[in-house]
Image: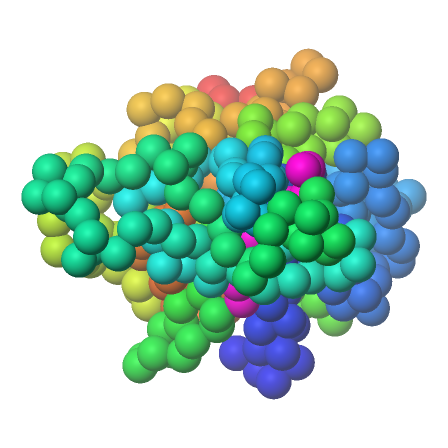
Amino acid sequence: MNTESKKFLCNLLAQCGPSGFEETAQAVWVKRTKQFSDKVTRDVHGNAVGILNPKAPFKVMLAGHCDEIGFIVSHISNDGYLHIIPIGGIDTGVLPGSQVKVQTEKGWIDGVIGKKAIHLMEVEERRKVLPMKELWVDIGAKDRDDALKVTKVGDPISYAPNYLELRNNIFSSKGCDNKMGAFVVSEVQKILSQKKSKLKVGVYSVSTVQEEVGLRGATTSAFGIDPQAAIAVDVGFSSDTPGIDKRLVGEVSLGKGPILHCGPQINRVLGKLLETVAKKKKIPCQMSSLGRPGGTDTAAIQITRAGVATALISIPNRYMHTMVETCSTDDLVAASNLIAETILNITPKTDFVPK
């Protein structure tokens, strides 16, 4: 991965933005993506769209959601502790001891998620995973009045930025789900802007919002764009860690390329085209099966208006929905190149009707 792309990746991961509060992440995405687009638009939900060849009647949409799981303040106790409810799917078992950021009207403030020390627990307590209502965020407030000076009910909370480079081009960070997708669709825009003379269709790269709470941004942006074909980019389960049942998710490892999928939400023509291009261009990829439409933007885009030819590309991810999600930059590069090369093979005459 080149220096400019790496800087963008790190900057994007440094932003905090649970579903419904994606503004800072979108600001970073728009600033970068507009350099490689004919124009960039925004909508009332917060979706950001980078467009190449806006006058082309045949439209290909790319979607990668920029929102992440998080929390929202539901109550402030008399002692000044913030009680929280989840935004998206949260594993409460990994929360105690986490560092977080609270987005307030006066800016971001730091906090930690606390629980009773293990030394003070009864034996039975130690065996239990606490429900979220029994956890709290400590911002160091003296009491409720002191806490109310800087925060209030309704303020969003994210895991604190924690990008960490590991070995073999592998990195760990909160928010890989799914700033990886937002990164890739911007990177595809960069690649295609340098090959624009070969581009025969309009490309609408969308950093979608509110995926973690119901694919909401993809639903509205796809309706507005009305594409003929679309590729969503999200993260997918790797199976290269202990305890994963490969009978369910297949053989998927970090660093061996993005995941291509077969299943009901994958248009047979577009899915085959991705496989053909990967083989022809010698781009590494892995295969996985999907028995149901699933919970990615693809599911919403596929049934927009009269229907869209859709495909899903996933970036292998370890430890999903934790604050230490782990991915490979090699997979990001391969996914970006594969999508770009596939779009260059699409023309207004491409027929996506399965036969």
Question: Where 274 sits versus 100, above or below?
Answer: above
Q: Nearer the viewer, residue 217 or 159?
A: 159
| Lateral position of residue 256 relative to residue 8, left or right | left
Question: Does residue 226 show up?
Answer: no
Which residue is outermost to the bottom? 3
Question: Does residue 133 show up?
Answer: yes
Name the residue at 31% across, 81% down: 167
Residue 93 shown in magenta: no
Residue 188 in percent (x, y) is at 64, 60
Q: Report the number of numbered marks.
A: 0
Q: Nearer the viewer, residue 160 or 325?
A: 160
Display coloring = rainbow
* Part of the protein shown in magenta: 153-161
Residue 158 shown in magenta: yes
| Lateral position of residue 86 relative to residue 146, left or right | left
Name the residue at 40% across, 43% down: 135
In the picture, residue 78 is in which quadrant? top right
Residue 172 in percent (x, y) is at 40, 68
Residue 81 in percent (x, y) is at 53, 48
Name the residue at 39% across, 53% down: 114
Q: Nearer the viewer, residue 87 or 336?
A: 87
Which residue is outermost to the left? 123
| Lateral position of residue 203 relative to residue 212, left or right | right
Question: Where 312 sits versus 354, above or below?
Answer: below
Q: Nearer the viewer, residue 51 or 221?
A: 221
Residue 257 in percent (x, y) is at 37, 61
In the picture, residue 268 is in which quadrant? top left
Name the residue at 34% across, 50% down: 115
Question: Where 67 sits versus 296, above or below?
Answer: below
